[in-house]
Amino acid sequence: MFDVGASELFLIVIVAVVVIGPKDMPMALRTAGRWIGKMRKMSNHFRSGIDAMVREAELEEMERKWREQNEAIMKASPQLPSMNPTADDMQPPAAEAATGADAGTAEVPSAEPEPDTAVKKSEEPRQAEMHLPPPPP
């Protein structure tokens, strides 16, 4: 910012000693130091305010892009499976059921299940097969 070389700084010190005098020089340097400190504090405060505004603008831009991408994804695949599993989702496939402990006595499912058992299976999910984590506190 200020390009002050060694010779220019030496000239400023000599002029300050002659004009202010050696007796009042420490008080003048303290006053100049306070002013410089205040200017630095104000510039840092201003800079941090500008940085905060830039971060907020970037955050708003990222949120806008996220919303646009989310809408595009939702339009592309509107039929995603729900996050709430049903009893039908929790039932193991037929191949896994046949390989269980009673694989030798497993029946081949008929084309039409009995009405009583079909309703009970879809209404009551078996807790042992669900493997769901506990609810959050």
Image: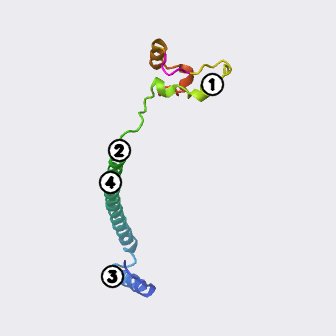
Residue mark closest to the camera, 1 vs 3: 1
Of marks 2 and 3, which one's residue comes earlier in the chain? Answer: 3
Membership of 110 in magenta stretch: yes
- Amino acid type, residue under disc 1 in the picture: Ala
Disc 1 to disc 3, how far (Cα)?
104 Å
User: Pointer 3: residues within 10 angstroms few (<14), some, or many (20+)?
Assistant: few
Res 98 label: 1
Asked if disc 3 and disc 4 are in contact, CB closer than 8 Å, the reply is no
Task: Please provide the residue range marked out in magenta.
Answer: 109-113
- Secondary structure, magenta segment, majority class: loop
- In front here: 25 or 120? 120
Q: Residue at x 65, y 26 (%)?
A: 99
Res 19 label: 3
- Label 2: which secondary element: helix
125 to 37, vertically: above or below = above
Res 74 label: 2
Disc 3 to disc 4, how far (Cα)?
50 Å
Res 56 label: 4
Disc 2 to disc 4, how far (Cα)?
27 Å
Of marks 1 and 3, which one's residue comes earlier in the chain? Answer: 3
Q: Quadrant of residue 22?
A: bottom left
